[in-house]
Image (cartoon, rainbow, N blue to C red):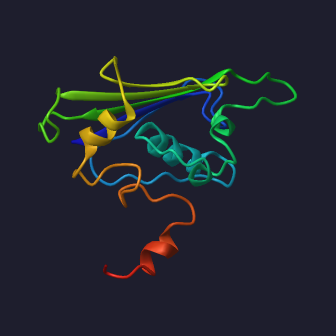
């Protein structure tokens, strides 16, 4: 199984629909300061069920919705669609697994797996024991490397 694509719209700095396609192997996201690198990794963690706004560098969850600029109005929702190639059947699911999370400014939210509405618990169970999830070290966000190096074996 590998991360094939992330598609974001209205998530933090990504007002327009943005698709990032990945190849197999190790992936690193590089770019200048302020280009949205951290927002890409946070979108993945958020789609996989992150519930802490502080972990996403916000005060409350609606802070992840594009807030607008002087030239562009705010959006009413954020959506992240994460596509995994599961052709090796690592997950007990289809050959392609698509996880979608939406959050509306009014507080409504939803999770989908392969276009079927599911609960947050279902998303967590799908990725349980895979090494990939909101708290895994597979996704290393800004400021987390030092805590990984300084952690104890326990």
Q: Residue 147 vs residue 127: left or right?
A: right
The correct choice, above or below, for 38 with respect to 12 in the image is: below
Quadrant in which residue 63 is drawn: top right
Q: Is residue 44 above or below residue 81?
A: below
Left or right relative to 151: residue 91: left
Q: Quadrant of residue 23?
A: top left
Residue depicted at x 49% and y 48%: 41
Instruction: Identify the residue shown where x is 51% and y is 40%.
Output: 43
- 49 left or right of 68 in image: left
In the rendered image, the quadrant that contains the N terminus is: top left
Q: Of residues 38 and 112, which is closer to you in this image?
A: 112
Residue 98 position within the rendered picture, expressed as x and y whole percent measured from the top left: 32, 27
Q: Position of residue 59 (x, y in %)?
A: 70, 48
Q: Nearer the viewer, residue 122 or 16?
A: 122
Q: Locate residue 32, reporting x and y percent.
A: 65, 53
Residue in the picture at 43% in, 54% down: 28
Name the residue located 57 percent from the left edge and 54 percent from the top edge: 55
Marker count (numbered):
0
**Can you name the residue that lies furthest to the right here?**
70
The C terminus lies in quadrant: bottom left
User: Could you tell me residue 96's position as x and y percent?
Assistant: 23, 27
Quarter where residue 103 is shown: top right
């Amino acid at each position: 199984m590998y991360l094939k694509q992330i598609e974001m719209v209205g998530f933090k700095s990504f007002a327009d629909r943005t698709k990032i396609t990945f190849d197999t192997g190790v992936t690193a996201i590089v770019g200048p300061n302020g280009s949205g690198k951290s927002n890409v990794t946070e979108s993945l963690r958020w789609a996989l069920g992150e519930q802490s706004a502080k972990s996403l560098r916000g005060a409350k969850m609606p802070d992840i919705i594009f807030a607008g600029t002087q030239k562009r109005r705010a959006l009413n929702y954020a959506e992240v669609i994460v596509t995994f190639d599961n052709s090796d059947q690592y997950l007990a699911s289809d050959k392609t697994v698509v996880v979608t999370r939406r959050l509306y400014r009014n507080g409504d939210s939803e999770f989908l797996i392969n276009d079927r509405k599911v609960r947050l618990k279902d998303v967590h169970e799908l990725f349980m024991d895979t090494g990939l999830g909101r708290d895994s070290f597979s996704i290393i966000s800004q400021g987390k490397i030092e805590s990984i190096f300084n952690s104890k074996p326990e």
